[in-house]
Amino acid sequence: MDVIPATHFVGFRGDEYVSAVRIWGKPNFVHRVWDRRAVRDIDPTDTVIFAKGTEHDEPCKFNGQDIVE
């Protein structure tokens, strides 16, 4: 099974999101916080861009709220 790499944005809000899109293009996934769900969603072939912090930071104990539009 071939895996298609995805782009994940973690912790972006407002203007920093717009700036990241200009550089990286639109993400496949947006994670409001670095939580356990985000960790599970990321494949080793994916690109993950953090607004703050790194993948080495401890994920939040609780899952972040989903974006409601």
Image (cartoon, rainbow, N blue to C red):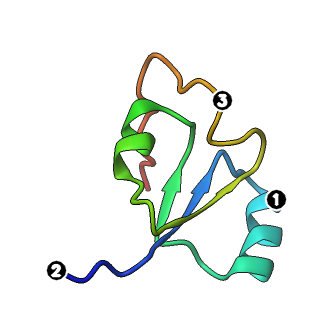
Amino acid of disc 1 = Glu
Q: Nearer the viewer, residue 8 or 19?
A: 8
Residue furthest to the left in view is 1
Residue 64: give x, y in percent of width and height.
46, 32
Along the viewing direction, whichever of 25 and 1 lies nearer the viewer? 1
Q: Residues within 10 Å of mark 1 (few under 14, many from 20)?
A: few
Mark 3 is on which residue type? Asp
Element type where label 2 sits in the image: loop
Q: Which residue is mark 2?
A: 1
- Please, what secondary structure does the residue beneath circle 1 have? helix
Disc 3 marks which residue? 57
N-terminal of the pair, mark 2 or mark 1, is 2
Q: Position of residue 23 (x, y in %)?
A: 79, 79
Relative to residue 13, is residue 6 depicted above or below?
below
Q: Secondary structure at mark 3?
A: loop
Q: Say which of 14 and 26 sits in front.
A: 26
Give the image quarter of residue 44.
Answer: bottom left
**In the rendered image, which residue does mark 1 sit on?**
16
Image height check: is 35 above or below 69?
A: above
Q: Residues within 10 Å of mark 2 (few under 14, many from 20)?
A: few
Of the two numbered discs 2 and 1 in the rendering, the one whose residue sits closer to the viewer: 2
Relative image position of residue 28 (x, y in whole percent): 46, 72
> Is residue 26 shown left or right of residue 39?
right
State which mark lies toward you, 3 or 2: 2
Q: In percent of the image, x 66 and y 82: which residue is there?
A: 25
Image quarter (top left, top right, bottom left or bottom right) of the N terminus: bottom left
**Vertical placement of 20 versus 23: above or below?**
above
Please give the name of the residue rendered at 44% of the width and 56% of the height, measured from the top-left corner. Answer: 69
**In the depicted structure, whether residue 1 falls above or below residue 44:** below
